[in-house]
Amino acid sequence: MNKQIKEEKNCFLRDYSLQKEVEKLDLSEKIRAQLNLANIRILLPKKDISKKNNRFNVFVSEALEISGEYRICYLEIDEYDIKIAEFKGARGDRYSGFYKMLVAFLDGQVEYKNEKNKLILKIQELERLLNIFNDISCLYKDGKCEVRSTAKTFTKKIGGESCEYPIKYYELIDNKIGKELDVIHKTWIDIRTEIEEQCKVLIEGTGDQFVSAYKEIQQMKQYLEKILNDNNERKLALEKNRGIQF
């Protein structure tokens, strides 16, 4: 069995900027804007001039180390679809610590195809995927998941020597959290549907229908404004950390 050698940690720079990493990507302005608002860290592979710059590693927002333990997945975004892999290439850590959580959340919320160890989503699912990344980052930050070693290992060369390291995955401390997240997403879908229905009544309705829809939309507006106000401090902190405004 190959031995283990304690390797030097590779860390994110203190002045890491998500926006600067996103700017390097050969993607549309709309997609880059969506990525800039995500609660994640990304890291591009070494530039290959023969390939489009549309591939990157995704880490939880609180990750300090550049390692498989804090990685969610490896992502490739094309014009029509999104390809998700646990890792790419033989170098580095051959696993992503949050990958199993990602797949579990995708199973309940997003349609995808599984081809040659890659999950393929339609580009229209990008917003939902980023919301799942946000959920995973929040769960990690709030201490609601913990890392557990498996019986599997991967081989990595350190100083010319082949060494074995354990493959570790994060799991929810309480499986009920997954159900709570599912409820949150379903609730938002219900709210969005209700808003669309009331807006239609407001535009097309007359008399009592118009008055009722107008009052309903006013109440929804107050509810959404309260949520935005309650989360304003977090918004300001994100703007400061990433050097952007939204």
Image: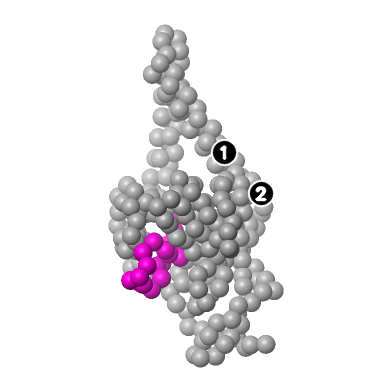
Q: Where is residue 40 in the image (x, y as percent from the top left)?
A: 44, 58
Stretch in magenta: 39-61
Residue 179, compared with residue 164, is above or below; it is above
Compare residues 109 and 49 and report the one nearer the observer: 49
Which residue is denoted by mark 2 in the rendering? 176
Residue depicted at 50% across the width and 73% down the height: 89
* Amino acid, disc 1: Lys
Judge left or right: residue 244 versus residue 80.
left
| Residue that carries the numbered disc 1 in the rendered image | 186
**Residue at the spot 43% in from the left edge and 64% down from the top edge:** 56
User: What is the secondary structure assignment of the residue under circle 2?
Assistant: helix
Q: How far apart, in angstroms, are the residues tagged by discs 2 and 1?
A: 15 Å
Mark found first going from the N terminus, 2 or 1: 2
Total label count?
2
Give the residue type at disc 2. Answer: Lys
What x and y, as percent, mark residue 79? 40, 52
Percent coordinates x, y for residue 108 in the rendering: 61, 47
